[in-house]
Image (spheres, grey):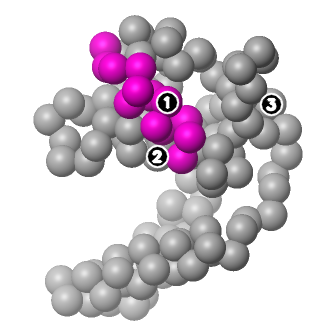
Amino acid sequence: MFLNIDFSSELSIYEQIRRQIILALARGDIEYGYDLPSVRNLAADIGVNLHTVNKAYKLLEEDGIIEMDRRRGSKIVDKKLPIKEEKRDDIFENLNFLVAFSRLKGISKEEIISLVEKIYGF
């Protein structure tokens, strides 16, 4: 699978799972409609508690990235769904912090824009 968990990271494992699934979808490493491993199987594969994977999946479901069904399992949604307003606000808040932090560390506006263009293009 495309996940690479860093057990020494300060970022929680469930957040690493969430972010890596989002990144894999954005890069095209996984496609819309992709069937994710079951919570139990993924937990066993990466050596974490199943509640950790379940939390990551629940957050992805709240993000509108995956659909969870007890009978059919979890999968990436079939298409891009419109973003909920509260999620848009979360993105703005996170981006606002990152830009402010970057300014304090001496990263210019041009560098930030260049980085965003590089990341956006993968």
In which image quadrant can residue 13 be found?
A: top left
How far across and how far down the image is residue 76, in percent? 72, 35
Establish if 6 lies above or below 120. above
Which residue in the protein does label 2 denote? 19
Measured Cα–Cα span from mark 3 to mark 1: 19 Å
Q: Is residue 50 magenta?
A: yes
Which residue in the protein does label 1 denote? 54
Q: Which residues are magenta?
A: 47-59
Q: State left or right for residue 28 relative to residue 15.
A: right
Q: State left or right for residue 114 relative to residue 83.
A: left
Q: Residue furthest left?
A: 8
Which residue in the protein does label 3 denote? 33
Measured Cα–Cα span from mark 1 to mark 2: 14 Å
Look at label 3 and name its amino acid: Gly
Look at label 1 and name its amino acid: Asn
Q: Residue at x 35, y 81 (%)?
A: 97
In which image quadrant can residue 14 be found?
A: top left
Q: Residue at x 14, y 35 (%)?
A: 8
Q: Is residue 102 magenta?
A: no
Measured Cα–Cα span from mark 2 to mark 3: 18 Å
Q: Residues within 10 Å of mark 2 (few under 14, many from 20)?
A: some
How far across and how far down the image is residue 31, in percent? 74, 33
Q: Earlier in the sequence, mark 3 or mark 1?
A: 3
Q: Residue at x 85, y 38 (%)?
A: 78
Q: Earlier in the sequence, mark 2 or mark 3?
A: 2
In depth, the one of 96 and 13 nearer the eye is 13
Q: Is residue 38 visible?
A: yes
- SS of the residue under disc 1: helix
In depth, the one of 26 and 66 nearer the eye is 66
Establish if 55 lies above or below 100. above
How far across and how far down the image is residue 98, in percent? 35, 77
Q: State left or right for residue 78 relative to residue 31.
A: right
